[in-house]
Image (cartoon, rainbow, N blue to C red):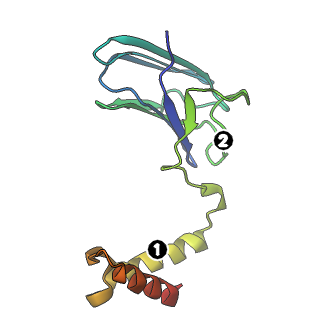
C-alpha cells in the first residue's frame, strides 16, 4: 500500500493533519495515545492508501476526531499536554517524503502575548470601522496600481 500525501500544523491545544485524498472511500482513522493510523481507498482507480504515524508527543485519543470531505480527510488531534509546541509531527527526526508542513495554516502561537493580540484586535477593529476612500473592504484594484500606492501610504501612516 502507498502512503497518502499529508500536511500538518500545530496549535496551542491540538495538532491538525490533513490527508490530501480526493474521493476517498472506506476511510479508517485510528487514534492511539502515541500513534495515528489512516487508511482509505482513493479515486476512481480505487488505490489503497495507508499511513501510520508515531507521534511526537501523546494525544488524548478520546477527544481526537476526523472529518472527511470530497477533497481530503482532516484530523484533529487533541494534545495530552496543551501549550507544549510540537517542532515536528513524528517521533523520529527523519524526513518523511509524504508529509509536509501546512504553512497556510501554521501560526507561531508560542510567541503570542495577550498585549500583542490586543493591539492586533484594536488595529483590526479600527480598519473595520474606517470608511470612505480608504475602506479596505471596498478597495477596487486597477491595472495601474494607484490603489496599491494609496494602500501603502495608508499602512505607512498607521504603522
Where residue 141 sits in the image (x, y, percent)?
A: 30, 75
Kind of element beneath mark 1: helix
Kind of element beneath mark 2: loop
Q: Which residue is mark 2?
A: 86
Left or right relative to 97: residue 104: left
Label 2 near label 1: C-beta < 8 Å? Answer: no
Cα distance, mark 1 to mark 2? 26 Å
Where residue 85 sits in the image (x, y, percent)?
A: 66, 46
Please identify the quadrant where the C terminus is shown: bottom right
> What residue occupies the far front of the structure in this picture?
144
Q: Which mark is residue 22?
A: none
Where residue 50 sits in the image (x, y, percent)?
A: 49, 15
Left or right relative to 36: residue 87: right
Left or right relative to 152: residue 111: right
Question: In this figure, what is the number of numbered marks?
Answer: 2
Of the pair 32 and 16, the residue shown nearer to us? 16
Within-10-Å neighbours for mark 2: few <14, some 14–19, many 20+: some
Q: Name the residue rendered at 25%, 77% in the picture.
A: 138
Q: Name the residue rendered at 59%, 74% in the picture.
A: 115
Q: Name the residue rendered at 62%, 67% in the picture.
A: 113
Q: Earlier in the sequence, mark 1 or mark 2?
A: 2
> What residue occupies the far right of the structure in this picture?
93
Where residue 84 sits in the image (x, y, percent)?
A: 67, 45
Within-10-Å neighbours for mark 1: few <14, some 14–19, many 20+: few
Q: Which residue is mark 1?
A: 121
Of the pair 58 and 102, the residue shown nearer to us? 102
Residue 97 falls in which quadrant of the image?
top right
Amino acid at each position: 500500500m502507498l502512503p497518502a500525501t499529508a500536511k500538518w500544523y500545530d496549535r496551542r491545544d491540538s495538532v491538525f493533519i490533513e490527508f490530501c485524498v480526493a474521493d476517498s472511500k472506506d476511510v479508517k482513522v485510528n487514534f492511539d495515545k502515541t500513534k495515528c493510523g489512516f487508511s482509505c481507498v482513493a479515486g476512481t482507480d480505487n488505490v489503497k492508501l495507508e499511513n501510520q504515524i508515531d507521534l511526537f508527543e501523546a494525544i488524548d485519543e478520546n477527544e481526537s476526531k476526523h472529518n472527511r470531505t470530497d477533497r481530503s480527510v482532516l484530523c484533529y488531534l487533541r494534545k495530552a499536554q496543551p501549550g507544549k509546541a510540537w517542532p515536528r509531527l513524528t517521533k523520529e527526526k527523519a524526513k518523511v517524503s509524504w508529509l509536509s508542513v501546512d504553512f497556510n495554516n501554521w501560526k507561531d502561537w508560542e510567541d503570542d502575548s495577550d498585549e500583542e493580540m490586543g493591539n492586533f484586535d484594536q488595529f483590526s477593529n479600527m480598519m473595520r470601522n474606517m470608511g470612505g476612500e480608504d475602506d479596505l473592504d471596498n478597495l477596487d484594484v486597477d491595472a495601474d496600481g494607484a490603489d496599491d500606492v494609496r494602500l501603502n501610504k495608508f499602512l505607512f501612516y498607521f504603522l
